[in-house]
Image (cartoon, rainbow, N blue to C red):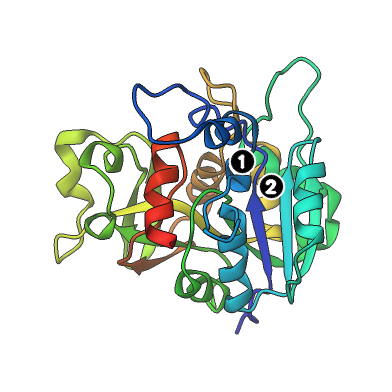
């Protein structure tokens, strides 16, 4: 029996490029637009009492019982440290920095982020941890389902029908091919007219929202040696996981869940989340 996973890793080193894109119309004021264009998405004010996106996420992490949270940021993390210095969470908050190579303008992706975390905190190479995005609000249940899972590695497989996004947006989410409750592969760009081949016996199709439980010992080699995407030149965690699955078939548990996951990707999402949270 694998013990409860007490470690949560939050990925917050991205450049927020889609958030910084201009949109034709918006009800955001000048202050909101400035935040969207200059801050990490997870530090944008969402709550009526000044809460940022990451406050809501870490509050759920605390309710789920994590005792250690590792926040991976870029090298300029002073705003993160300043913000959370004023918070009083029950868990230990650790900071890790994803360094950007001197010949690049942005970090090398989520697999590289996890690799750099394991280098900076070697004890995690021998432990289990849950990994999530900083711009999605995962529920307490989702966190608990993963942290209490008695498998070494797992992910939450979200029922597409429960997500409250547009059909176009959902169509861009990675689909999970599942066999006997285990992940066969994570398909980043599934063939649109062949989605039924991914459905379970009840006709449900499941997608990934980048919420994983990983074993440092099992995944280290794969995040370290993850290949870069030929166009984006980023090392992505789903690619590392797929490479692990090729060598270790049906060893990655799929935990189904039917619920919405609030997401902060673009300026339009700021207004949507404010309506949901306030």
User: Do the CB atoms of the residues marked 2 and 1 lie less than 8 Å apart?
Assistant: yes
Seen in the image, is 30 located left or right of residue 102?
Answer: left
Question: Residue 118's spot in the image, x, y percent?
Answer: 78, 51
Q: Residues within 10 Å of mark 1 (few under 14, many from 20)?
A: many
In the picture, the disc for residue 110 is 1
Q: Relative to 27, does residue 255 appear above or below in the rendering?
A: below
Residue 184 in view here: no
Question: Residue 43's spot in the image, x, y percent?
Answer: 63, 46
Quick one: SS at disc 1?
A: helix
Seen in the image, is 223 located left or right of residue 185?
Answer: right
- Identify the residue under disc 2: 114
> Which residue ends up furthest to the top in the rendered image?
103
Q: Residues within 10 Å of mark 2 (few under 14, many from 20)?
A: many
Seen in the image, is 23 located left or right of residue 16?
Answer: left
Question: Residue 57's spot in the image, x, y percent?
Answer: 57, 61
Residue ID at (62%, 80%): 2
Quick one: SS at disc 2?
A: helix
Residue ID at (47%, 45%): 264
Nearer to me, 79 or 122: 79
- Give me the C-alpha separation between circle 2 and circle 1: 6 Å
Q: How many marks?
A: 2
* Residue 170 position by quadrant: top left
Question: Residue 173's spot in the image, x, y percent?
Answer: 35, 42
* Residue 15 position by quadrant: top right
Q: Quadrant of the C terminus?
A: bottom left
Nearer to me, 277 or 247: 277
Residue 141 in view here: yes
Seen in the image, is 225 located left or right of residue 257?
Answer: right
In the picture, the disc for residue 31 is none
Residue ID at (63%, 41%): 111
Residue ID at (38%, 59%): 276
């Amino acid at each position: 029996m694998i013990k409860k996973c007490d470690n949560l890793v939050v990925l917050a080193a991205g450049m927020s490029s889609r958030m910084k894109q201009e949109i034709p119309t918006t009800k955001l004021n000048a202050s909101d637009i400035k935040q969207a264009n200059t801050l990490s998405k997870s530090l944008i004010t969402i709550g009526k009492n000044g809460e940022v996106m990451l406050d809501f996420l870490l509050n759920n992490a605390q309710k789920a019982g994590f005792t250690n949270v590792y926040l991976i940021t870029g090298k300029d993390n002073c705003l993160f440290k300043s913000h959370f210095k004023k918070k009083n969470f029950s868990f230990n908050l650790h900071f890790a920095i994803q360094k950007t190579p001197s010949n690049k303008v942005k970090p090398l992706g989520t697999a590289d982020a996890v690799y750099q975390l394991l280098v900076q905190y070697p004890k995690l190479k021998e432990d289990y941890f849950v990994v999530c995005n900083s711009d999605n609000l995962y529920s307490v249940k989702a966190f608990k389902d993963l942290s209490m899972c008695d498998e070494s590695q797992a992910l939450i497989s979200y029922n597409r029908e429960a997500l409250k996004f547009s059909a176009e947006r959902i169509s861009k989410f990675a689909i999970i091919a599942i066999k006997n409750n285990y992940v066969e592969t994570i398909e980043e760009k599934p063939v649109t007219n062949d989605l039924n081949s991914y459905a379970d016996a009840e006709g449900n199709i499941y997608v990934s929202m980048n919420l994983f439980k990983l074993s440092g010992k099992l995944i280290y080699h794969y995040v370290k040696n993850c290949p870069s995407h030929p166009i984006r030149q980023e090392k992505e965690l789903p690619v590392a996981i797929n490479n692990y699955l090729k060598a270790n078939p049906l060893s990655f548990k799929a935990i189904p869940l039917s619920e919405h996951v609030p997401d902060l990707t673009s300026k339009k999402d700021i207004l949507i989340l404010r309506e949901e949270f306030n």
